[in-house]
Image (cartoon, grey):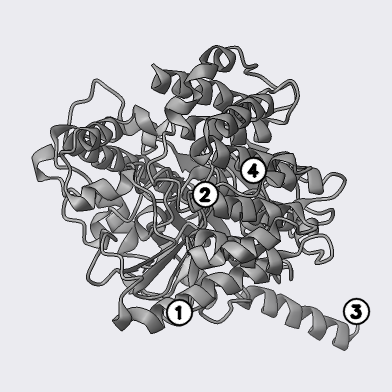
Amino acid sequence: MDRRTFLGGAASAALRAETPALPNILWITCEDTGPHLGVYGDKYAVTPNLDALAAKSLVYTRAWSNAPVCAPARTTIISGLYPPSTGAEHMRSRTRLPAGMKMYPQYLRESGYYCTNNAKEDYNLEKPGKVWDESSNKAHWRNRKPGQPFFAVFNILITHESQIRTRPHEWKHDPAEARIPAYHPDTPEVRKDWAQYYDNITTMDGMAAKILDDLKSDGLADDTIVFFYGDHGSGMPRNKRWPYNSGLQVPLIVRIPEKHRALAPKDYAAGGMTARPVSFVDLAPTLLSLAGVRPPEHFQGHAFLGKYAAAEQPFVHGFRGRMDERYDLVRSVRDGRYVYIRNYMPHKIYGQHISYMFETPTTQKWKQLYDERKLNATQRIFWEPKPPEELYDLDNDRDEVTNLAKSAAHREILERLRKAQRDLVLKIRDVGFLPEDEIHTRSAGSSPYEVGHDKAKYPLERMLRTAELASSLDEAALPELTKALDDSDSAVRYWAALGFRMGSRTPPAKALDDPSPSVRAIAAEAFGLFGNAAEAAKALSMLLDLAALDRNSVYISMLALNALHSMGRRAKSAEARIRALPTEHASALPPMNGYIPRLIEKILEDLK
């Protein structure tokens, strides 16, 4: 060996000695948990282990989930994309990525990581090939090859919404000491549910400690970056499923050991807090950045740690689509202080009857008191139609109950956040403005993402304009909405028909003969509610035909059944036909088939 070769080899060895190996990365996640931990100043919380982790970590005080329910939230994380851009925003739907796009563990595995998930997936996207080395309740970093860097996820279920209402239960937190948000009635049922939620968080705290103990006992704590976070806000009603701060803010704690401190942000300090806004769409690029991999250009988030950390972003964004069997379309945005909500379907009440949500005692009691007219003005809001826009000042209104959207003093703030929300819709090419059936029919042979990014096939600007007019509830929009019923694009016509429905009017009768079943369903709903007896009868017959799963997709059936339910007693004459409707579709995913019987059952219950 000559001297140059020897020196070159020595230099390389020295460089390797100075450069830390790739960091291991551990994610400890939990279900349905807002920032209700001691480290966040919650005096009711008992979380000694996570508080101890936080004392060695950086705590994010403005972390958002993007989606206030599990499947769309996890879909955001796994893809690095906002689900409204991939057609995957609707609860337990299933779409696909364009060919060539991967889920983040695939990029990590290509760079040498052993990637495990223990064990919940719950994605609204088909997996593009093998995503995890192992995804099961046996998945563990201990199964990797010797010396191989790992990325491991452990998901704790005890804090899930379903566990709030599990009985019998022995309360550890005193229900009398629970803080009741202004929107909830102060009743024993509500207090017990909040106390049980906090009990479950304490249990989860101990389970998280066990995972951290395993890491330490394996001698890996000094080599491993640890994240702890919840998948969205609490499982209590008006938190979960709603893209307010209360439904989207999550705890996020990140510990970076000294060995990998070069990957930390400048403001990193053990026990420190940062107000940097981050959200779930940022997690995939952040992981790749920590692994030294440049995030792909199509990712829509921004890395906040590691080699490729990006500049701080001014906003975080949220969304709501179909929640189980009930349709809606909401977009939200937060800056450091304010939350802006855009309701594109303001005619739908906040508290639509979602069967799963109504299993919680709080929901049942809250609705009972509303029906009995025993709620105050703030508590009644959840059971009534929405305004087109909402604006809340988190510094002075932590429960988001004082809507400032019409405040002259807040006009500039409203317009700034409104623009931020609209800009994101256009930037990511939000396909949520398609009726759900058309997300699937238009993307046959490709993907919703590709449809959305083809301006010739997806006239989003025209569609968004119509949706904004329709949901404004402004009578002055009627001439333009009437014109939009002749648009060449069926989704524009869909929003035009919705504009009449939301304005408590019947559209021109031609909408009932539209080639699109989604347009016909909305037009029939309007005629069923606001037409004369003959028109209502015709509309009822049309909705029954559209609800039949043997002739329509499950998405059209759900749309029609929701319309039938909105008709109330006007659908009474069709009770027998509703009872006889098919309840399963051969090609539908199991959860989707479950939504149809729930809708039929609720319609019949309310017709009694």
Q: Report if residue 301 is visible in the image.
A: no
Closer to the camera in the image, 547 or 357: 547
Q: Secondary structure at mark 4?
A: loop
Q: Is residue 547 above or below residue 345?
A: above
Q: Who's the residue at 83% across and 82% down the image?
A: 6
Q: Position of residue 586 (x, y in %)?
A: 74, 21
Q: Position of residue 560 (x, y in %)?
A: 61, 33
Q: Position of residue 218 (x, y in %)?
A: 49, 47
Question: For the residues carrying marks 1 and 4, which lies nearer the camera in this image?
Answer: 1
Q: Is residue 492 above or below residue 92?
A: below
Callout 1: 10 Å neighbours few (<14), some, many (20+)?
few
- What's the CA distance linking mark 1 and mark 2? 29 Å
What amino acid is labelled 1 in the image? Glu
Q: Secondary structure at mark 2?
A: loop
What amino acid is labelled 2 in the image? Arg
Q: Position of residue 390 (x, y in %)?
A: 38, 64
Q: Secondary structure at mark 1?
A: helix
Kindly indicate the quadrant of the structure image that contains residue 574. top right
Q: Who's the residue at 51% across and 16% down the image?
A: 575
> In which quadrant is the N terminus drawn?
bottom right
Q: Earlier in the sequence, mark 1 or mark 4?
A: 4
Badge 4 vs badge 3, beta-carbon distance below 8 Å = no
- Return the mark for residue 1: 3
- What's the CA distance linking mark 4 and mark 3? 57 Å
Question: Disc 4 designates what residue?
Answer: 124
> In which quadrant is the C terminus drawn?
top left
Question: Disc 2 designates what residue?
Answer: 505
Q: Who's the residue at 58% across and 51% down the image?
A: 498
What amino acid is labelled 3 in the image? Met
Question: Disc 1 designates what residue?
Answer: 415
Q: Earlier in the sequence, mark 4 or mark 3?
A: 3
- What's the CA distance linking mark 4 and mark 2? 35 Å
